[in-house]
Amino acid sequence: MTQQPASSIRDGEKVTSTILIVDDAPENLAVLGEVLAPAFKVRAANSGARALQIAASTPRPDLILLDIMMPDMDGFEVLARLREDGATRDIPVIFVTAMDAVADEERGLALGAVDYIAKPIQPAIVMARVRAHLELKQARDWLKDQNSYLEAEVARRMQENLMIQDVSIRALARLAEVRDLETGNHLLRTQGYVQTLAETLQNHPRFAAVLTPRFIRTLVKSAPLHDIGKVGIPDHILQKPGPLTAEEWHIMKTHAKLGSDAIGNAERDAEHPIDFLAVAKEIAHRHHEKWDGSGYPDGLAGDGIPVSARLMALADVFDALTSRRVYKPPMSTEQAAAIILQGRGVHFDPDVVDAFIATRDRFDAIARRYSDGEQPS
């Protein structure tokens, strides 16, 4: 809470600012005390060391009147130490001195003093300067409090928006999952697999430029939309328990473009570019492409396939192999790993397969955590 001026009223009581006066001469402390005591709470220190102790104690002074010419530790050193300590850095300091050299004034201001009062002091001038700088401090404290509040509110709303965004993505993705008779755990597993591969490859020379921490976060957020295009596939094909005919397979393959087109339409409706939609469209469109160019829908090959789609390709195949489908029972993770290894340099990017082999324990842990027999945690 910000300080209020000495004359302000809060909850029916007078609120008094605290002034610390520092001078090695008792008579100077007495004079300043007589001037300030009627309006403020006054604390006094007769040395620089004592001033630093009081300034760091609670309650901290709202303003310090500091003599320059003191033995052992002069006012310049006291001010420098006050500014080095985070607890006292923001306390305004006014020098009270008989010195009138411009160089000394410049030095004090450079160290952070807010003003000078010349000795012998004039009570009216002292009160005017003190009140002015207390009001300035109040304004700074109020702005600081407001900024802190606004920063916290912005962070809260951003977190709320991200949560809404994540829930919306899951809701959209599960439209396809419900019709495909798969579970929401499929989304969590493939997200985990993609994140594992991306984090493993983020320092690899071939991937470092793309797999930045920000891109990885976007990639993981986008992953659940990889099969959103399945909402456009008829049930008799999507849920067929046996092999698809050539015509049915041709229709099934259109889900890649259906998904990317749907996300592309959402992009066009947005007022500004949204990273996760761009990556989601890329994944939906390209995650069935194969390293040797034999995939669909466009027969892309090698590095022509986006990195995001190369990671999702392996994650999706591993999950399909190890999960129950209407047309097959699940494989063990060992069997699935053997098939993926056979696809190294054919179906999958060789380095992505190597990352998979290096992180098999993490893949297995994700598969166990989000198995179809368990509820997502």
Image (tube, rainbow, N blue to C red):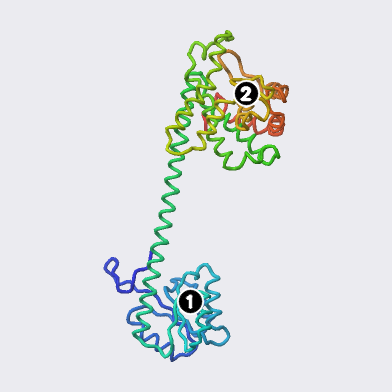
Q: Tell me residue 224's x, y (percent).
A: 53, 29
Q: Tell me residue 222's x, y (percent).
A: 53, 33
Sequence-first tag of 2 and 1 = 1
Q: Is residue 262 left or right of residue 309?
A: left
Position of 261 relative to 329 (above/below): below
Determine the image quadrant of residue 186: top right
Q: Give the SS element for disc 1.
A: loop
Q: State the mark number for residue 326.
A: none
Q: Tell me residue 288's x, y (percent).
A: 60, 22
Looking at the rendered structure, the kind of residue marked 1 is Ala
Query: What residue is pinned by disc 1?
Result: 113
Image point (46%, 32%), residue name: 267
Residue at the left extreme of this rendering: 12
Identify which residue, 347 or 179, lies in the foreground.
347
Query: What residue is pinned by disc 2?
Result: 289
Q: Tell me residue 310's x, y (percent).
A: 63, 29
In the rendered image, which quarter contains the N terminus?
bottom left
Looking at the rendered structure, the kind of residue marked 2 is Glu
Q: Give the SS element for disc 2.
A: loop
Determine the image quadrant of residue 32: bottom left
The mark lying in front, picked from 2 and 1, is 2
